[in-house]
Each structure stands twice: as C-alpha cells, then as structure tokens.
Amino acid sequence: MIYYCPSCWAEIAGHAEMCPACGADIRDFAGESYELKLIRALRHPEPTVPLRAATILGELQSKAAVPALIETATRTEDPYLQEAAVKALGALGDEAAAPCLDRLSREGALRVRIAARHALGLLGRHARQ
Ligand SMILES: [Zn+2]
C-alpha cells in the first residue's frame, strides 16, 4: 500500500507521523476520508496536484466534489486545471455544473471551451452559440 501526504500528495511511509516533504502532521488528517483529501488537494499550490485530484475525483464519481470542482474551474487561470475540472464535471454529470460549463464553453482557452462543450453534452445540454 502506498501512502500519500494528504497535504502535498508526496509519497510517504505508512508509519510516518510527519510528511518529510511539507512537514504536515499526518495524524491531523487521520479521520478525513480520501475523498475529502482529494477535494482539499484542488487548492494545492503545486500545479500538478490539483490536476491529478480533479481527474481522480471524476473517475471516483465523487458527487461531493461538484461544488469544489465548479469553484476550481471558475477560480483558476490555469487552462490545464480548468480543463481537468471541466472534464470531471462532465463525468459527474451534475446539473449544478451547467451554468459554469455554459460560461466556459464560450470564453477562455480553446481547450477549455472544447472540454466544456463536451461536458455539456454529457449533461444532455447543448452549448449556446
Ligand atoms: Zn506533505
């Protein structure tokens, strides 16, 4: 079993009490679910971490992540993270994401617009022209 620091997602030893990479106290997170940790990772400053978290949340069908994914897609200026959040929202198929996806299908980076149009299709919606 591989363990990851719930704060920075560095690989750590299973018996560690403190993350050697970021110094987070692992015991603080013991009661938190994997899903919650991933949702929190959406705000991680290392760019690849939120990207990975968004993808995993989509694959896990994490309905609880929908508000955080909407917030991420709206907040970030990183088109790759936006794209990952949009794809996850499409995979989750939650209607709550429709206004956000509709907006992103019309503005921003091309890769984000394409992903948002596809995600709207998965929600049974069509992008407005
Ligand atoms: Zn850490």
Image: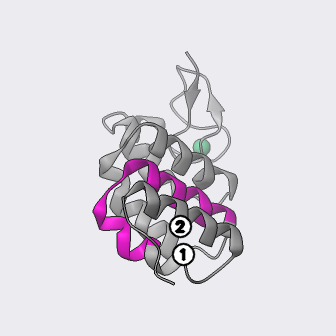
Q: Which residue is mark 1?
A: 105
**Residue 23 visible in image:** no
Q: 73 or 40: which is nearer to us?
A: 73
The image quadrant of residue 30 is: top left
Q: Amino acid at mark 1?
A: Ser
Q: With 108 as the anchor, is 1 left or right in this view?
A: left
| Element carrying mark 1 | loop
Spot the residue most to the top: 1
- CB of mark 2 within 8 Å of CB of mark 1? yes
Find the magenta span and give its range.
80-101
Disc 2 crowd rating (10 Å Cα; few below 14, some 14-19, many 20+) is many
In-image side of 6 versus 115 (left or right): left
Q: Which mark is residue 117?
A: 2
What percent of the width, then of the height, locates residue 124? 36, 59
Which residue is depicted at the point 42% across and 74% down?
100
The residue under label 2 is which amino acid type?
Arg
- Find residue 108 and report its horizontal and vertical position in percent: 63, 81
Between marks 2 and 1, how big is the CA–CA gap? 5 Å
**Residue 56 image position (x, y, % from top left):** 52, 41
Residue at coordinates 47% horizontally, 74% vertically from top-left?
A: 127
